[in-house]
Amino acid sequence: MQQVKFITLILLAGLAAMWTAPAAAQPVARVLFIGNEYTDANDLPQMLEKLAAGTGDALMTGKSTMPGFRLMQHFQLDKTKLLLKRQQWDYVILQEHGILPLDERMRERSMIPAVQRFRKIVTDRGATPVLFVTWASRQGARKTPYGDFNSMQKALTDSYREAAEHGEIMIAPVGEAMRRALNNDKGIVLFFSDGQTPTLAGTYLAACVIYAALYQRSPFGSSYTAGLKPEQARFLQDLAGEMIHKERNRWHIPRPRKDPTP
């Protein structure tokens, strides 16, 4: 009888140790954002951190943003260069000027060369570049062939895909996700009255898309909702996850892995 009690105590002690032992350290994904007000709006990098934390993932972000900046200007900016060189990043999110990709000449002379220069310096440092597809204006682009939201968004998405083909760079199709969310007409307001500035819901969808691209899995179920109604947050989470899952090849998304550190 005493032997049975002794064995029982050992088992209970072992179970207690299992419950109280500290968990293994979670790999921290380090993500640098390079862009302008599209990235700054509602502090997208911080929202991505909170979204990841809501799923139990550890993620740290940094950013180099300047209003109206082009990627080529960032490539020449000391602040951006120092951020790239002084810290070790896993991913570098590259976001171009809002309408520059619509101009073929500027795309060929500025956007694509800048993406390629960033791709080299980022990959040389062991990180993965990711192109952040921005969203169209609700009114389209005046004085261009893209006078409505859908045609402008298609042109933007196509331009980023063209830039990504030079090296098969990963794409986070944020603007395309916004187009699909609007066409679903769930009553979720993604933009303010200017048709360009994202609401919290718009930035939340951007964070969901970037999360799905980096982790190769849906953010569905994250406890962080940015103050949105639970059903709205779930819809945006699911839209982002399904889009990345079903169109992995289109956006150059690699096979799923447990954590997003390359």
Image (tube, rainbow, N blue to C red):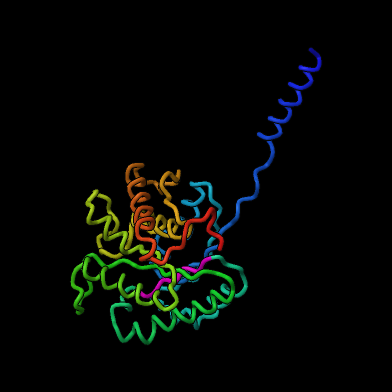
In the picture, which quadrant includes the N terminus?
top right
- Taking depth in this image into account, of 180 and 63 the one nearest to the observer is 180
Magenta-tinted stretch: 91-97
Residue 235, compared with residue 65, is above or below; it is above
Could you say where residue 200 lies in the image, as x and y percent from the top left? 36, 54
Quadrant in the picture for residue 194 = bottom left
Does 75 appear in magenta? no
- Taking depth in this image into account, of 250 and 192 the one nearest to the observer is 250
Could you say where residue 70 lies in the image, as x and y percent from the top left? 40, 78
Does 92 appear in magenta? yes
In the picture, which quadrant includes the C terminus?
bottom right
Horizontal relation, residue 255 to residue 58: left or right: left
Residue drawn 24% across and 71% down?
152
Quadrant in the picture for residue 261 = bottom right
Could you say where residue 180 lies in the image, as x and y percent from the top left? 27, 57
The mark tally for this picture is: 0
Residue drawn 61% across and 68% down?
88
Residue 4, compared with residue 30, is above or below; it is above
Horizontal relation, residue 174 to residue 8: left or right: left
